[in-house]
Amino acid sequence: MQDNIAVLREWIAGSDNIVFFGGAGVSTESGIPDFRSTDGLYRQEYKYPPETILSHTFFEQNPEEFFRFYRAKLIPDKSVQPNAAHRRLAELEREGKLRAVITQNIDGLHSDAGSKNVIELHGSVRRSHCMKCGKSYGLEFITSADGVPRCSCGGIVKPDVVLYEEPLNESDINAAINAISDADVLIIGGTSLAVQPAAGLIRFFNGRRLAVINKSPPSADDEADIVINGSIGETLGSITVNS
């Protein structure tokens, strides 16, 4: 594995057109639970299955239960901070090497770490909007409201996260496709690439250097030039341009 880390270090040192595509494994190292692991949300017991609660149909039919779950399980605690992976990616952007971070996470930690060009495929808990008049709200409005948050116009304020049965934002998809297709180095980290359609975006990669960093082998292993099975925070945190 150390040989592969050395190769990745060389790629990063020699490129100014890197794109990072990340999933839940990036945020688990900050203490945010994922969905599919042994201790993930999908393995816990609830009145309804989490997949059902996080669907558009359930949101419309049972918003009280949706927001109870959403506040308890999807909004990170204020103590949660970016980890070494978030910080190193932000540094690579400042160094002029990383062009974009494409993330399936909704926690906003990449922006907290200082990354500017972040494409949030599944939205963000930091944003919400009134479904009736379109007025925008921040996270505090959701956390401070009792029950179902409502706008001054009376409409329900919905978090800007993509629920099951909802399509991804078209402009985000196009931005991700453009970034991936133009990159000469693509780093995939912290994702099993099991969630579609986001996972299918990697097929647009035209470059020659594809690296996968994940604690367990994802489905992209067969296509990857190098695979590093380990902590993404430790791996990226150990790589500096001059090391």
Image: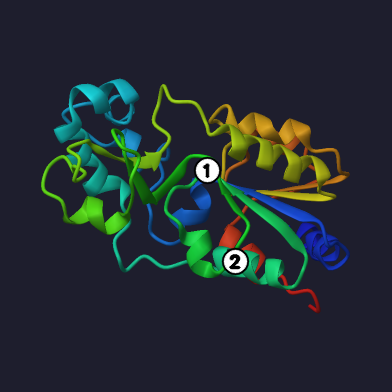
Q: Secondary structure at mark 2?
A: helix
The amino acid sitting under disc 2 is: Glu
Which residue position is annotated with label 2? 234
Q: Is residue 5 above or below residue 102?
A: below
Q: Is residue 59 above or below residue 124?
A: above
Along the horizontal axis of the image, is 197 left or right of 92?
Answer: left
**Residue 232 picture location, percent across and down:** 59, 58
**Residue 179 picture location, percent across and down:** 74, 46
**Residue at 33%, 45% in the rendered image:** 135
Q: Secondary structure at mark 1?
A: loop
Along the horizontal axis of the image, is 112 left or right of 236?
Answer: left
Say which mark, if any, is on residue 9: none
Mark 2 neighbour density, 10 Å: few (under 14) some (14–19) many (20 or more): few
Q: Is residue 186 above or below residue 111?
A: above
**Residue 139 picture location, percent across and down:** 31, 55
Q: Quadrant of the N terminus?
A: bottom right
Say which mark, if any, is on residue 104: 1
Q: Earlier in the sequence, mark 1 or mark 2?
A: 1
Along the horizontal axis of the image, is 122 left or right of 40?
Answer: right
Asked whether the beta carbons under mark 1 and mark 2 sit within 8 Å of each other, the answer is no
Asked which quadrant contains residue 52, the reply is top left
| Residue nearer the viewer, 234 or 84 | 84
Question: Residue pushed farthest bottom?
Answer: 242
**Residue at 20%, 21% in the rendered image:** 61
Asked which quadrant contains residue 65, the reply is top left
Q: Nearer the viewer, mark 1 or mark 2?
A: 1
| Residue nearer the viewer, 45 or 184 | 184
Does residue 83 appear in the picture of this structure? no
The amino acid sitting under disc 1 is: Gln
**Residue at 32%, 69% in the rendered image:** 79
